[in-house]
Image (cartoon, rainbow, N blue to C red):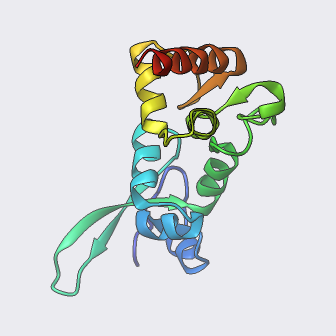
Amino acid sequence: MQEKKCVDGVESLEEKESLKEIFTISEAAEYAHILPQSIRSAVKRGFLKSGTREHVYPNGTKQLRRVITLEDLDEYRKKKFLRDKLLPSGEKVYEMNKGRFSALQIAKIISTSLRRPYTQNKIRQAIRTGELKAHKVGFVWVITKQSMMEYKQKEIESRKKK
């Protein structure tokens, strides 16, 4: 009789696997439409629960593999912070009419105003150096309309001096 392994409280691993309720990291990434590295990162940071399972290769070698249950993956996907969509509270992260902009949106606005290319990397550099005031929401920077206007004015003045 084969002993059933326990994966973070899941008793019947074989049964769940046959129903495709257990995923490897690669399978979980494909299911969630994200990169495997994102899954690994979420597991490492504790945002996504996982367990281990012994895998036997055709040549007889054994290796432990990290596995994720469908339930845990779905829970992670519901809680996952989406950059362009919603905060956990249901409020949008970037809303131009409420004066909250992303680095890319600011770059486009300034490019149009200055009539020259302006990249989001330049905006991020300005945030890091303190030239542009911004605050973090989750892991993305949000720039207020007032900060954007001040920075835009500084850029216009510095361009006039040249």
Quadrant location of the N terminus in the rendered image: bottom left
Q: Position of residue 68 (x, y in %)?
A: 50, 59
Q: Residue at x 77, y 34 (%)?
A: 95
Observer-nearest of 86 and 143: 143
Q: Residue at x 62, y 44 (%)?
A: 80
From the viewer's perspective, is residue 66 above or below residue 59? above
From the viewer's perspective, is residue 99 above or below residue 104? above
From the viewer's perspective, is residue 13 above or below residue 152? below
Observer-nearest of 21 and 101: 101
Q: Position of residue 111 (x, y in %)?
A: 57, 38
In the picture, measured across the screen, residue 111 lies left or right of residue 50, that is right
Q: Residue at x 58, y 63 (%)?
A: 32
Residue extending furthest toward the bottom: 58
In the picture, measured across the screen, residue 41 lies left or right of residue 31, that is left
Q: Position of residue 145 (x, y in %)?
A: 71, 21
Which quarter of the picture shows residue 21? bottom right
Q: Residue at x 23, y 80 (%)?
A: 57
Q: Position of residue 156 (x, y in %)?
A: 55, 20
Quadrant location of the C terminus in the rendered image: top left
In the picture, measured across the screen, residue 141 lies left or right of residue 41, that is right
Observer-nearest of 11 and 137: 137
Which quarter of the picture shows residue 45? top left
Q: Total of numbered circles in the picture?
A: 0
